[in-house]
Image (cartoon, grey):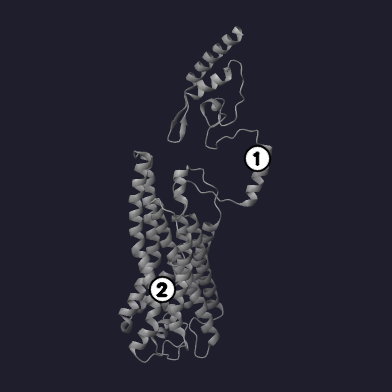
């Protein structure tokens, strides 16, 4: 998990009556590390799935623009992947090689614990900011404004470095002894800045993101109304789908990180009368929910208005070489039932090909115009005429063609 409480465990423990030692005596570290290993593995799987390239969308340009946040999602997944990797490595080493609490004089364990804790905190902070950047980008998009990728990257990678360095330098320097403090004021000056640097950013994203998504949904309704001049069932369904997606993005963030806020409040409000069982329960919950953020993000950040397909370069090369040999074969939609009447009833079969022009009194062109004039465009699709209409018009065209041939 990513929590300032674990970072205090990296300090030297010269006082055996310290509250952290008392808590750890009732804490099953092997079970905790096993839970962390499982959840971080699931998180890495979810992050890798998000990073994998996607095939280009065949959606119209108007709706395709809503998926420009794909780059932000990829960087969010990269930060999640590295954070989950840090949790996994730390848990494996803690379970098999090192003690979760360094003893007096164990400098190597202190350095190992501090470095990995800083790694995990840095990349999880980056995920919080990328989550905020996605909400900001959606607001800019629906306000017909360009994104700010340079600002996103600067904010997402520099600010966590500043906050992490600020909190951990005060906590560990000069002697990594943050438990043998003589007064409450010294404890506040040594430990509180790290909690402050971590939880303020976490809380800001929790507050700002829902506000941005509510405003974005309203902007979406305005954009649809102005672009279409009407709101049909299809547009209503799209708006409702995106509204639900925004709500679930917020829900995932709250589920994954609210336990951390509760844990921090309990520690500082009731430090001298800690509910130890409640604290340990929260640690197990955080061990599950924090790394699983990437797994949940893989579900809620995917496109809900179209089916995403993974794109692999080797498969693309094979497909391209195959198309060279099969370019004379007409393309048939996989979801269309093909029969003898399909070329007539489905305009996407046959009519998307180049039809040779035959200049016998424009007979072939007249037939094409007669048949295609009966195709009505509705919501981006063509509605084909009945078989009876097609046959009757073909007969009329054939008669006209015969008459013109006799006249010649």
Above or below, 408 relative to 8: above
Q: In which quarter of the image is residue 277?
A: bottom left
Label 1 SS: helix
Lower position in the chain sequence, tag 1 or tag 2 = 2
What residue is shown at x 44% (from left), y 72% (from top)? 2
State the CA–CA distance, disc 1 to disc 2.
Answer: 55 Å
Is residue 182 among the parts visible in the rendering?
Answer: yes
Secondary structure state at the residue bearing disc 2: helix
Q: Residue pushed farthest top?
A: 407
* Within-10-Å neighbours for mark 1: few <14, some 14–19, many 20+: few
Residue 245: x and y in percent read 40, 53
Residue 391 coordinates in the image, percent (x, y): 52, 18
* Residue placed most toward the observer, 27 or 393: 393
Which residue appears at 46% of the width and 48% of the height? 65
Of 28 and 334, the residue lying toward us? 334
User: What residue is shown with label 1?
Assistant: 323
Q: Quick check: 251 left or right of 383?
A: left
Above or below 332: residue 126: below
180 vs 70: above or below: below
Going 31% across and 83% down the picture, which residue do you hit? Answer: 273
Q: In which quarter of the image is the N terminus?
A: bottom left
Visible residue check, residue 38 = no
Q: In which quarter of the image is the C terminus?
A: top right
Foreground pick, 61 / 291: 61
**Residue 61: where, in percent of width, then height?**
47, 44
Label 2 neighbourhood size at 10 Å, few (<14), some (14-19), many (20+)?
many
How many marks do you count on the picture? 2
Residue occupied by mark 2 = 283
Q: Residue 405 carries which label?
A: none
The answer to which image quadrant residue 22 occupies is bottom left
């Amino acid at each position: 998990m990513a929590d300032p409480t674990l970072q205090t465990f990296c300090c030297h423990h010269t006082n055996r009556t310290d509250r952290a030692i008392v808590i750890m005596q009732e804490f099953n570290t092997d079970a905790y590390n096993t839970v962390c290993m499982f959840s971080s593995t699931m998180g890495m799987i979810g992050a890798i799935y998000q990073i994998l390239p996607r095939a280009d969308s065949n959606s119209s340009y108007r709706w395709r623009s809503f998926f420009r946040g794909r780059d932000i999602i990829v960087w969010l997944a990269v930060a999640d992947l590295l954070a989950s990797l840090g949790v996994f490595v730390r848990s494996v080493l803690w379970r098999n090689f090192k003690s979760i609490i360094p003893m007096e004089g164990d400098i190597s364990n202190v350095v190992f614990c501090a470095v990995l804790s800083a790694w995990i905190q840095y990349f999880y902070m980056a995920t919080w900011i990328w989550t905020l950047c996605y909400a900001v980008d959606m607001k800019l998009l629906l306000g017909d404004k360009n994104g700010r990728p340079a600002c996103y990257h600067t904010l997402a990678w520099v600010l966590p470095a500043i906050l992490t360095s600020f909190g951990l330098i005060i906590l560990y320097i000069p002697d990594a002894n943050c438990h043998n403090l003589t007064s409450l004021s010294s404890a506040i000056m040594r430990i509180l800045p790290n909690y402050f640097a971590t939880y303020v950013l976490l809380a800001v994203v929790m507050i700002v993101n829902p506000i941005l998504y509510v405003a974005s949904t309203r902007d979406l309704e305005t954009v649809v109304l102005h672009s279409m001049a009407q709101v049909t069932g299809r547009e209503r369904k799209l708006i409702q789908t995106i509204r639900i997606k925004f709500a679930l993005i917020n829900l995932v963030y709250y589920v994954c990180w609210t336990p951390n806020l509760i844990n921090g409040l309990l520690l500082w409000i009731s430090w001298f009368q800690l509910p130890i069982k409640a604290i340990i329960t929260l640690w197990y919950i955080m061990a599950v929910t924090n790394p699983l953020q990437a797994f949940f993000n893989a579900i809620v950040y995917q496109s809900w208005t179209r089916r995403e397909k993974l794109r692999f370069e080797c498969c693309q090369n094979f497909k391209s070489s195959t198309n060279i040999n099969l370019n004379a074969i007409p393309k048939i939609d996989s979801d269309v039932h093909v029969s003898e009447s399909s070329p007539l009833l489905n305009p996407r079969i046959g009519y998307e090909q180049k039809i040779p022009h035959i200049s016998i009194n424009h007979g072939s062109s007249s037939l094409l115009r007669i048949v295609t004039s009966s195709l009505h465009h509705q919501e981006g699709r063509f509605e084909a005429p009945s078989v009876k209409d097609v046959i009757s018009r073909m007969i009329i065209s054939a008669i006209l063609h015969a008459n013109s041939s006799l006249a010649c």
